[in-house]
Amino acid sequence: MTLERAIAEFDRALRAVAGVHRTGRPSPAGDLPEAQLEDARRAEAAALMRVNHVGEVCAQALYQGQALTARDPGTRRSLEGAAREEEDHLAWSAERIRELGGRPSLLNPLWYAGSLAIGVAAGVLGDRWNLAFLAETERQVEEHLSGHLERLDAADRRTRAVVEAMRADEARHRDSAIALGAAELPQPAKAAMRALAKVMTTLAYRV
Ligand SMILES: [Fe+2]
Ligand SMILES: [Fe+2]
């Protein structure tokens, strides 16, 4: 790895953890009106967005782990596009947490470090497994976001717009990982990822 790339990756890690974001695309919440929500509903939306934001911090780390280990330059380039969209998600969800009066997870540095380690470990197994892991992650995130859309208030159009746009992107990310030649993860690996995600989302909902 060149020094220039090492610095770029380090910069990305710092931005993800510190909550400083560059956005490519404006937030899908746009100028949709802010809903009048009961306090409890608003707090729940903020907590759900905190969970999503943690997911996006992890996505940064996973894609970074992928970038550090991907062998095929074509694969790496294709995944850079998805990684940029993940940066948008990070910024959109952070902004929405603030609008809802919440705060990001205090454990973000921990989530980041853990995901980076997992991403690098998956990458070491080779591109096919690396992509398999990414595809499964995107699939599980998509499921989570669908669950959140069921829980969010129908009137909360700003939050819903962000979640819906993220879900559409994740579906495309998964398809592109599969198109790039992702293997199919064995069932126990998928179950382990699900269990880990459960711990993460339960904690992030609160802390
Ligand atoms: Fe994302
Ligand atoms: Fe994604």
Image (spheres, rainbow, N blue to C red):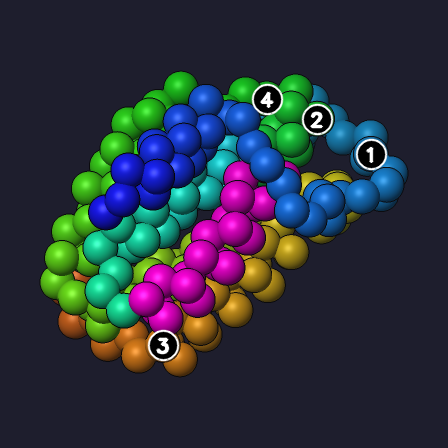
Q: Is residue 63 left or right of residue 193?
A: right
First reached walking from the N terminus: tag 1 or tag 2? 1
Location of residue 134 in the rendering, given as x and y in whole percent from the top left corner: 33, 61
Please rate how many residues cluster around mark 4, counting C-alpha atoms within 10 Å: few if below 14, some from 14 to 19, many from 20: some
In terms of sequence position, does the residue under pointer 3 or pointer 2 come before the other?
2
- Residue 203, magenta (yes or no): no
Q: Quadrant of the C terminus?
A: top left
Give how far across and how far down residue 63 sits, in percent.
36, 51
Label 4, label 2: how far apart the Cα atoms are: 8 Å
Label 2, on which residue?
99
Which residues fall within the magenta stretch? 73-92
**Residue under circle 1?**
34
- Name the residue beneath numbered marker 3: 180
Q: Amino acid at mark 1?
A: Glu
Q: Amino acid at mark 2?
A: Glu
Residue occupying the point 23% across, 37% down: 114
35 is higher (above) or lower (below) than 14: below
Mark 1 touching mark 2, by CB under 8 A? Answer: yes
The answer, for residue 139, to whether it is visible in the render is no
